[in-house]
Amino acid sequence: QVQLVESGGGLVQAGGSLRLSCAASGRPFSRYAMGWFRQAPGKEREFVAAISWRGGRTDSPDSVKGRFTISRDNAKNTVYLQMNSLKPEDTAVYYCAASSGSSLPLRTGEYDYWGQGTQVTVSA
């Protein structure tokens, strides 16, 4: 089992920045690829970013590329999501997830463990 706890969400004005953190406990963190997803009210959960278990590979969709950066610190069992140039359409609950089976998972079904989420609200 892996437990994931997100933090760092909040209310920010458009153009601002936030850094989300996800602290992991349980099985060795370095064995898992990690990802961030988000879900807005009435919408499906969507992929935001993923990082391989050593941190050498990352991926993100065009909607956030150049604005969001995923990173990890295996010594601290933590993955981060730096979000810059935030837009109102980035408003959502952001979830951290861990995958034991894929090197760079992009889909929700590839992840084994999920956090409870942290709310990010971007005002216009």
Image (cartoon, rainbow, N blue to C red):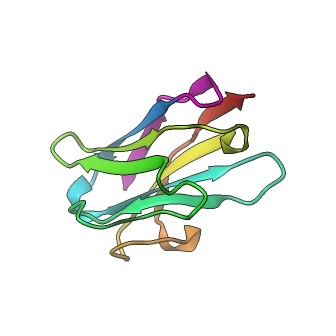
Does the magenta run of residues contain 11?
yes
Give the position of the N terminus as an image quadrant: bottom left
Main secondary structure of the magenta stretch: strand
- Residue 84 in view of the camera: yes
**In the rendered view, does 87 fall on the left or right side of 50?**
right
Q: Which residues are magenta?
A: 1-16
Q: Residue at x 74, y 47 (%)?
A: 40
Residue 13 image offset from top left, x and y in percent: 65, 24
When the figure is inspected, residue 106 is found, relative to residue 45, above or below; the finding is: below
Residue 28 in sight: no
Where residue 79 appears, as percent x and y from the top left, is 34, 46
Residue 29 is one of the magenta-drawn residues: no
Q: Which residue is at 57% across, 63% downward?
A: 62
Image: 82 above or below 47: above
- Along the horizontal axis of the image, is 102 left or right of 44? left
Above-or-below relation of 123 to 60: above
